[in-house]
Structures are given as structure tokens and as C-alpha cells.
Amino acid sequence: MEDLFNEILEKNEKIIKVIKPHKGRYMKDFLIPFIIPLLWPHLILTLVLTLFTPFYFIPKGYKNIYYAYTNKRLIVRKGIFGNNYDSLEYKDITSTSVKVGYLDRKSKTGTLIFVNPSSHHEHPMKFAHIQNPYQEMNEIKEIINETNEKTLSF
């Protein structure tokens, strides 16, 4: 799975771990909004969107979503028709959190949230639907602390 990120890795950058979201939890998260349109007055349009859209786009999105952390940064690989990458360097992370909602408790998953100053009012980087979220966050925080200590010692 490390090969999925080769095209964006820097020269001295190494993948530490690649994480795939929990498939069942991923599917539930995207199917719930498609149930609500059945109550809207435009029934034919919503039926078409409700019945066909999730079964085409959601599996394609799941196939391409991977999370990774390297010795330098966090990377999210996603996309339905192509591969898009988002990355966040460890030195830019100002806070982290773990979110475990009702559906997460049932599937024993959670979302890791990484915030940098420019994303406070926008969208922070998220590793969603991760199994063992607290353990994963602790592992990532160790890497962040090690990396930040190395940069401070220079």
C-alpha cells in the first residue's frame, strides 16, 4: 500500500504507516443523507438520486481513500475519478483530537482531527472511520513530538 503515495513523497520521506478506513462505517456515513430526500416533495428526482448515486459513487470513493503518515507529514489520498492528495506537515499542527460518535461506538471506529492555524475556520485534516482511533492518535502524536524535537534541536 505504500506504493500508492510514491508519486508525492519527497526525497528523504518514508511512509511509517498506511491506514484504510473501516468499510462498513464508511458506507453508513454516506448512505444516511440519501434516506432523508425520500421525504421531500420532488419524489421522482430524489428517488433517482437516492437509488443510483450511492451505489455508484460511494464504492468508487472508498476504493481510493487511504490515510498515511510519514516521517515528515500526514497525507490523505482520496478521489472518485482520480487521485487527490492533501498533506499537512507536523510542524504546522497546532492541535489534535479524536471524535467518536454514536455510529462509531457501534463499529469501534473514530475520526482523528488535525488542526493547523489556517484550518481553524475551514476544514481541518481528518482521518475518518479509523479502527482503534485512540491508539492510532497516540502513535501519530509520538511521531509528531519526535519530529518537532529534531527540528528544535537544530
Image: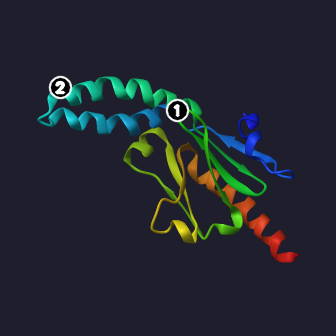
Q: Nearer the viewer, residue 67 or 78?
A: 78
Badge 1 marks a residue whose secondary structure is: helix
User: In which quadrant of the rendered image does the N terminus lie?
Assistant: top right
Q: Residue 85 placed where, x, y %?
A: 62, 46
Report the Cα–Cα distance between label 2 and label 1.
27 Å
User: In which quadrant of the rendered image does the C terminus lie?
Assistant: bottom right
Q: Nearer the viewer, residue 143 or 64?
A: 64
- Relative height, residue 85 to residue 151 (above, below): above
Crowd around label 1: few <14 · some 14–19 · many ≥20 (10 Å): some
Q: Amino acid at mark 1?
A: Tyr
Is 28 on the left or on the right of 39, as rendered?
Answer: right
- Relative height, residue 2 to residue 126 (above, below): above
Confirm whether residue 109 shows in the render: yes
Q: Residue 18 placed where, x, y %?
A: 69, 41
Q: Residue 38 placed where, x, y %?
A: 19, 32
Crowd around label 2: few <14 · some 14–19 · many ≥20 (10 Å): few
* Tag shown at residue 12: none
Which image quadrant for residue 114? bottom right
Query: In the orientation shown, which residue stands out farthest toward the left?
Result: 41
- Does the residue at mark 2 contact the one at mark 1 (Cβ under 8 Å)? no
Q: Nearer the viewer, residue 130 or 40?
A: 40
Confirm whether residue 139 shows in the render: no
* Tag shown at residue 44: 2
Q: Amino acid at mark 2?
A: Ile
- Relative height, residue 77 to residue 89 (above, below): above
Q: Which residue is mark 1?
A: 62
**Residue at image point 71% right, 56% down:** 73
Closer to the camera: disc 2 or disc 1?
A: 2
Query: In the orientation shown, which residue stands out farthest toward the bottom?
Result: 153
**Which label's residue is closer to the chain start, 2 or 1?**
2
- Relative height, residue 130 to residue 57 (above, below): below
**Residue at image point 54% right, 37% down:** 79
